[in-house]
Amino acid sequence: MNSKLILGLAKSLLLARWRQTLVAAVGVTFSIAMFITLLSFMNGLNDLLDGLILNRTPHVRLYNEVKPSENQPVNMSSEYKASYNFIKSVKSGISRKELYNSGPIMQAVRADNRVVGVAPKLTAQVFFNEGTIDITGVINGIDVEEESRLFNFQDYVTAGSAIDAKNVSNSIILGKGLADILVADIGDVVQVTTAQGERFSLKVVGYFQSGIQEIDKVQSYASIGTTQKLLGQPANYITDIQVKLRDLAMAPAVAKEYAQLFGADAEDIQTANAQFETGSNIRTLISYAVGVTLLIVAGFGIFNILNMMIYEKMDSIAILKATGFSGRDVNRIFLVIALSIGFFGGFLGLLIGFGFSLIIDNIPFNTAALPTIKTYPINYSPVFYFIGGFFSLITTYFAGYFPARKASKVDPVEIIRGK
């Protein structure tokens, strides 16, 4: 049968039942709009939450882990094999946390085409002296410029300037929680005592805020030179080499390669932050599940409306078949009706979903814990819109398939006789 005629008949049936058609289209529109809004928001929120932690985490970290030697003296004597051993101390297999040949290692890593950049680091355990009270803390010695370029360090400095840690000698950027405990303002001088008993005066040039209170009460930052001076170590003393890769997915393989190549311990970002990746995957799965459920519910609505339409139009269907329309033609008419509802309702839903996303995107996601981070938890990935449009057509197709199949099998003789 002529396609133009079939389209015309489908249009007539749609307009004849325009209220029911409108209800079905609104159902599809609402489902798609919520699907797009939910996925855009949840995935944007995943990016936001993961980014707050992962932005400060190297893709690969090279270091020397202090661990016990595999061959302890008690295990080397055969006469003690069957007896109980009382351990007084465990002998370390590595006596120094320093990375040997850190300079050549960083030079070799920088030459790797898979690497975006390298940032050295070392840590110093200290006591912040507040009157007669000593507060335990950690000073991270960093290359401020590389740390800012690779790991957005400057975004977490909520007061002062990150570069002052490099430009001002004997300076420190205090964790905001620690600064509150010490009642230390920018420009003040704080006293620190190292594990070796040496006492130093450091000028506060900024506050650092990670958003995790327990970290901000302990962690502080200084230049590598200042931290080496605190530890009484030479200029080549480095305990960590932080590597940022072009492709995050390559981190596990690169970590294993570097561990073998440089004879150091290596930790990849996936291993260090497995819990965040798991949480993101679960939130994304929930978003898709809720979105698809909305579409299926809308599909049932279309199914019911088309069933009612067929029931009420039995006489019209019988006349069509009696005048030469085949069952296949009738099937096509009702599938066109279903797909039309899916197409126009889905298209409008995509537009409304985009509009809702824009509204959410214009609401700043600011927190007191991270006043410098101006983020908006919306992800405008075209994949979401493609999935939404595809599912709207698939759902409405199957919603219309069974009623259309029922209509195609109508026997015009029985309908006319019954009438």
Image: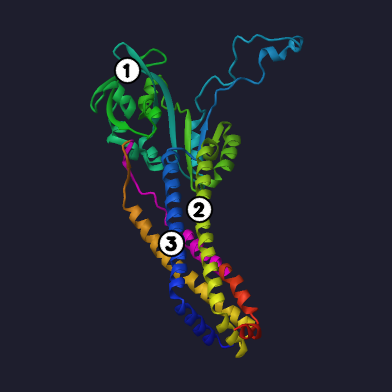
How far apart are the two marked residues, 2 and 1, measured between alpha carbons?
A: 57 Å
- Mark 1 vs mark 3: give the one in front: 3
Q: Which residue is mark 1?
A: 200
* Residue 199: image location, x then y, percent: 34, 15
Q: Is residue 402 left or right of residue 163?
A: right
Residue 181 colored in magenta in the image: no
Over which residues does the magenta segment extend?
A: 369-397
Q: Residue at x 54, y 60 (%)?
A: 296
Is 305 in front, or is 184?
305
How far apart are the two marked residues, 1 and 3, measured between alpha carbons?
A: 64 Å
Q: Earlier in the sequence, mark 2 or mark 1?
A: 1
Q: Quadrant of the N terminus?
A: bottom right
- Where disc 2 sits, the SS reads helix
How far apart are the two marked residues, 3 and 2, measured between alpha carbons?
A: 13 Å
Q: Residues within 10 Å of mark 2 (few under 14, many from 20)?
A: some
Q: Residue at x 40, y 29 (%)?
A: 215
Residue furthest to the front in view is: 418
- Where disc 3 sits, the SS reads helix
Q: Earlier in the sequence, mark 3 or mark 2?
A: 3
Q: Which residue is mark 3?
A: 30
- Mark 2 vs mark 1: give the one in front: 2
Q: Which residue is mark 2?
A: 290
Q: Earlier in the sequence, mark 1 or mark 3?
A: 3
Q: Quadrant of residue 203?
A: top left
Residue 395 versus residue 120 in the image, above or below: below
